[in-house]
Amino acid sequence: MKTTHELKTHGYRAVGLLLILAVLTPGVAAETPSSRLVAVGDIHGDYEALVAILQEARLIDSEKRWTAGNAVLVQTGDLLDRGPQVREIMDLLMALEDEAEEQGGRVVVLLGNHEMMNLMGDWRDVSAEAYLGFANQDSEQRRLDAYQDHTALLKRRSTILETPLDISAESKGQWFEAHPLGFFEYHQALGPKGHYGRWLRERPATARIANSVFLHGGIHPELGAWKLEEINQRIRREIEAMDVYKKQMVQQKLILPFSNLQEIVATAQAELRRLQGAGTTNEDQEVIQVLEGFLQFGNWLSVHPDGPLWFRGFAQWSEQEGREHLTSLLESFQVRRFVVGHTPQLSRGIQARFDGGVFLIDTGMLSSFYRGGKASALQIQDGQVTAIYRGSRQPLP
């Protein structure tokens, strides 16, 4: 695992990128006194299930207002994708952040791999219903205008690369199917300057609260020597770097603002081959360095299979492996337990592993996608850990 990867920042508009990479962003690692701590795992657009479990956990009332005083709610990521009501979920969590703070409590929302996918332009799991939640009266015209921009870009790139141009009725139909109503409003809202995009970019990847560490996937043993602040800073800088790379490629008329990650990668690879195969100017060399830097994103901590947003070892380790690794990880971070989502539990219940060193809280809340899934929450209070389901509670070791 490449945990020491640094972005290439020389050349084209390097000063701006260097400034971004130099930003130090604080992690959420402070102890927070609280009589009660509640964690909720993967939501995936199931707003109704989220509301129901927050009410079951006595965090909000029938009006969806915070009523839990100085309690702390942690959401461990993956509130986006698959389900239909991602906008309503973000609106609720953003409102609860303010309401909890007024009462001396906290709402901590963490990044999951699906938030990272969306921020990078990987939209394969966004549902048409979620897009529709962002549509308005101008959506159809905006879509028609975007298709004109798309065909203009295709023609320009086809001429430059000397490749066949496909603007057939079939390809047009496929484009409109892939760009439903609300598509452009969704991505503008989640962009760097968008209402939800700014909020998501401020969320950390990890949080230490009292004697527990919360995150989406898990901590690979090779990250055991890192501090949580370092993990949060690295991931935030990678998001900022991706925003810069995409902006630069739009300015160079290589991609459109709504190009997805697959399209951006294909364009970067094609342009890199073209520039490297021709006599290059100094300006070309600067563009080459940008493209090469962008194409290294697969090594970034935020997208690496062993990174904290994607790692599944806590769920997949054998008991022996887990006991060997958990001892050192718990000691390194000086906590009693890790609480993670990411891996839906086949039992559809919260699972404790390795003598309570790990709690797996993804129970497939979006039951229309995960058969038999159900909403759940993990409560930690006075040393007792309890699984909360709709209509029942179960003490855990």
Image (spheres, rainbow, N blue to C red):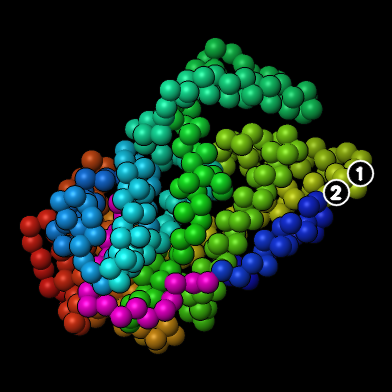
Asked which secondary structure carries label 1, the reply is loop
Residue 57 within the segment the image draws in magenta: no
Q: Is residue 152 left or right of residue 326?
A: right
> Where is residue 239, by image quadrant?
bottom right
Left or right: residue 266 versus residue 392 is right
Does the image show residue 8? no
Q: Give the main secondary structure of the magenta stretch.
A: loop
Q: Amino acid at mark 2?
A: Gln
Q: Which residues are magenta?
A: 26-44
Residue 285's disc is 2
Determine which quarter of the picture holds residue 135: top left
Q: Is residue 39 above or below residue 79?
A: below
Are the residues tagged 1 and 2 within 8 Å (C-beta)? Answer: yes
Q: Name the mark on residue 281.
A: 1
Residue situated in front as seen by the camera: 342 or 191: 191
Quadrant housing the N terminus? bottom right
